[in-house]
């Protein structure tokens, strides 16, 4: 089953360490999207495990592997949510590397930071949580050896700008790995996705009083890009190579683009 990931575009401009005492800048994206993401934050991880039968963890490991990240790298995780990909990246780069994890949701970043403090692995200390804007990344050009974005690009209004930003901050020859639901060209796969959302996802989410929040998933997939369209977009913003892989029986997809 498909893992439910709602990583919306970051909106607070500028690079900022997570600080629960700081004053949050006004949000520049749709307020209802930010409110939705904050509402689901407390049960986000549990529902992902439930809906995907734990398979989202396998898909995330695949996405990290496709990024080409290695020991000692400095890497970026955009729309990091509660930190799953960031933790996987930190294990790859080790204590000599660095992971910058960026998201617009203060609640998700707080959960991620709490998870970090509860872990004993030394490499997890190399993660820095940043509240920032996926469409206006607050980093210099050619800063990162690799980048990931899990279940986030689909929900960014200006996807081209987000892709341009990731291209800008990556070093030449490095890769971005983008994991999300697959907007399949197969009518069978699309029907299966719709059925799962209507008869599994939404009914279960209703038990958490989150039916409306998860019903949004169906329309967000239909408004997303197909694999071919993602490859084309990557090429248009400057990536030298782009390949889309269908995974999870075609319900998920992963774009790998080389700077």
Image: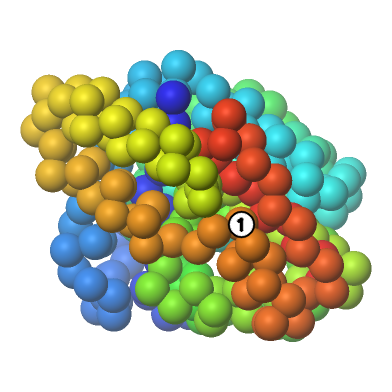
Nearest the camera: 183 or 162? 183
Task: Examine the rendered structure and indicate whether residue 259 appears above or below residue 81.
Answer: below
What residue is at 22 percent from the left and 33 percent from the top? 198
Q: Secondary structure at mark 1?
A: helix
**Image-based side of 1 in relation to 144, left or right:** left
Task: Examine the rendered structure and indicate whether residue 230 appears above or below residue 39.
Answer: below
In the rendered image, residue 48, in percent from the top left (x then y), is placed at 40, 29
Q: Is residue 69 visible?
A: yes
Residue 210 appears in which quarter of the rendering? Answer: top left
In the rendered image, residue 121, in percent from the top left (x then y), is placed at 68, 27
What residue is at 13 percent from the left and 44 percent from the top? 212
Q: Which residue is mark 1?
A: 227
In the rendered image, residue 109, in percent from the top left (x then y), is placed at 41, 50
**Image-based side of 15 in relation to 122, left or right:** left
Nearest the camera: 65 or 1? 1
Q: Neighbour class for label 1 at 10 Å: few (<14), some, many (≥20)?
A: many
* Quadrant occupied by the C terminus: bottom right
Q: Residue reaching furthest front?
A: 187
Task: Examine the rendered structure and indicate whether residue 38 appears above or below residue 199.
Answer: below
């Amino acid at each position: 089953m498909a893992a439910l990931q709602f990583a919306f575009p970051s909106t607070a401009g500028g690079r900022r360490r997570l600080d629960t005492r700081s004053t949050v800048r006004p949000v520049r994206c749709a307020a209802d999207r930010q409110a939705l993401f904050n509402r689901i934050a407390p049960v986000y991880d549990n529902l992902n495990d439930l809906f995907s039968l734990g398979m989202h963890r396998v898909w995330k490991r695949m996405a990290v592997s496709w990024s080409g990240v290695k020991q000692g790298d400095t890497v970026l995780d955009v729309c990091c949510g509660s930190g799953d990909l960031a933790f996987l990246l930190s294990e790859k780069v080790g204590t000599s590397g660095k992971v910058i994890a960026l998201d617009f949701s203060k609640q998700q970043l707080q959960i991620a930071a709490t998870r970090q403090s509860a872990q004993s692995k030394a490499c997890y200390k190399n993660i820095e949580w940043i509240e920032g804007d996926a469409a206006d990344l607050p980093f210099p050009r050619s800063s990162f050896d690799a980048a990931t974005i899990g279940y986030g690009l689909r929900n960014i209004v200006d996807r081209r700008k987000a892709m341009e930003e990731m291209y800008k901050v990556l070093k030449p020859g490095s890769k971005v790995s983008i994991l999300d639901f697959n907007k399949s060209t197969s009518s069978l796969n699309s029907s299966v996705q719709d059925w799962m959302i209507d008869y599994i996802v939404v009914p279960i989410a209703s038990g958490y009083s989150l039916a409306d929040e998860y019903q949004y998933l169906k329309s967000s997939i239909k408004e997303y890009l197909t694999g071919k369209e993602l490859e084309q977009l990557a090429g248009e913003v400057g990536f030298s190579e782009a390949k889309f892989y269908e995974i999870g029986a075609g319900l998920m997809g992963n774009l790998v683009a080389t700077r």
